[in-house]
Image (cartoon, rainbow, N blue to C red):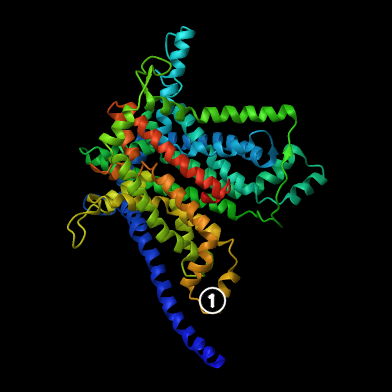
Amino acid sequence: MAQTSADTVAVAAPTAGPRTSVVALLGFGFIWAFLILFLVYPLTRIFYDAFTNEAGQFTLVNFQEFFTDRFYLRSLWHSILLGVGTVVTTSVIGIVVAFLLIRYEFPFRNLFSYLTLIPIISPPLVGVLGFVFILGRAGTVNVLLMDYFDLLKPINFMYGLHGVLLVETLHLFPMITLNILDALAKVDPSLEEAAESVGARGWRKTWDITLPLTTPGYISGALLVFIWTFADFVTPLVLGVHDLLASQAYLNIVQFVDRRLFRMGIVISALLVLLAIVFLLAARHYVAIKDYSSLAYSKVERRRLGPVKRWLTVGFLGLLMFASFIPHIGVTLAAFGKGWSLTPFPVQYTLAFFERVSVETPKFILNTFLYSGLAVVVCILVGVPMAWVLARTQAPGKDLLDAMTTLILAIPGTAIGIAYIRAFHFPLPGIGVPLTSMWIILPLVLAVRRLPYTVRGSFSSLLLVHKSLEEAAGSVGATKLRTFWDVTLPLVWKGILVGSLFSFMTSIQEASATLFLTLGGWEMIPVGIFTFYIAGSQSEAAALGFILIVVAALSLLVINRVAGTRMGGMFG
């Protein structure tokens, strides 16, 4: 009987191998087909348009016009200056906050750990509107200053590059904090102890030992901050700043009269992608030429601060959180307030604006949840197998897959949106209508934009599951698919959940790519906010912004419960 069982296993096992191999090959092919069709092809098309003329002939005239136009050159310089300035300000704040949270014990530390993540959930459009409500020319602060200090003119807190820098800094510094937290958690304490043993203490130890070891995480965060700022066109437009590359790309594309301007919009988009790739390669090269290895990872015991330093720390973090929450305060007051004109605060409060956006025009909310939900489904179907390939196989093209995942994070949404317009504005075979005329293009572009979060969340969890557990299942006859379902998935579901929630949370905020592709009836909440604001209905825009903040905050609460502050790898 035992011999019969053994023969059965011996016969059955070989039949599982080819079937599994076919499934694996189909999955691998599906991943590449998705990336080629919805990432590589659109980007290739935008470069083709940038380097050809109307007759389809290769030319450099388009770029010659760009680099000989003083206004475009000024826009390029201002964009780089703004990006570098934002990296500097977010680095100072983000690194200090990360060190305080991970190395020291003080009152309300856990609360600050959670609150520090909140600013990043506020979409740029919502954030800039909130700042305008509080710090604008007719905002709360200026009204109070004019009422109590008899100022004849309002102070310009917001309008100009300095206002864009303020908004971007308070919105993006958590991205630096998360990456530094992740990197600091991996610094071997013995290295710092060795430095102290030879007299290096305090700032000298931090500068020579600790900060260099956090370089890979810091570079990842700084690169994303730079590119995020570089590609944001909504914030500058609201604050009246037009001489930036992203703003010019948007303004040139949305006009339908001058074909030369439209072509320059495509050229600027190609430059945005090219610069993002150059910055990404430079950052990876800088990290690659240095050694950041550590002997072991150990938990660092937090130090207790003295009474004065303790409350100085609480005061600093409290003021930072207050400044970061200014847009949330402004949006909340505008969403619930009525009669807020030349007064510090609304004179009445009402739910009428929520009724209008949720009952009279529910499409913004319904579309947001539908498209973002479908995008997350696509992210899981593509991202989890991709993470498996990266973590568990030596498949050909594995390194290229990893590079493309990082590249997606670096490519500006503005360029992706314009690339989709150019790539899919032709009738599909068998259907006769272009993909740009079908609402499904919005979940697809959202899925491409947010795929890296699902991949990285799943990948980081797979690295924590030892291969021997899967090998044990295979040794008793389980196929790879059965092993993944019964053994691996129960162990990595938290990483998949965190990555998927982060993909969802950032999808509902997306404006830069979807704004170019949205047709009537397809509008999501960010587009609705932009539409209401342009039409002068600021309270309705604020109501939609408040809904967006609440949904994102709930998503972040779940993520924080599951992953804690270990989310730096999501951006790395």
**The quarter of the displayed image where residue 303 is located:** top right
Q: Residue at x 55, y 58 (%)?
A: 461
* Residue situated in front as seen by the camera: 544 or 400: 544
Q: Is residue 463 above or below residue 507?
A: below
Q: Is residue 25 left or right of residue 10?
A: left
In front here: 173 or 414? 173
Residue 365 point in image, percent of width and height: 33, 41
Q: Residue at x 34, y 44 (%)?
A: 368
Q: Residue furthest left?
A: 432
Whether residue 59 is visible, yes or no, is no
Q: Three-letter amino acid code at disc 1? A: Gly
429 horizontally vs 232: left or right: left
* Along the viewing direction, whichever of 123 and 76 lies nearer the viewer: 123
Percent across and percent down for residue 307 are 74, 28
Q: Residue at x 66, y 37 (%)?
A: 100
Binning the other alpha carbons within 10 Å of mark 1 as few (below 14), some (14 to 19) or many (20 upward) gives some
Give above or below for 35 relative to 227. Answer: below
Task: Determine the secondary structure under disc 1.
Answer: helix
Given the current orientation, which residue lies at the most extreme front position?
A: 1
The residue depicted at 36 percent of the width and 42 percent of the height is: 512
Q: Which residue in the structure is indicated by mark 1?
A: 474
Which quarter of the image is occupied by the N terminus? bottom right
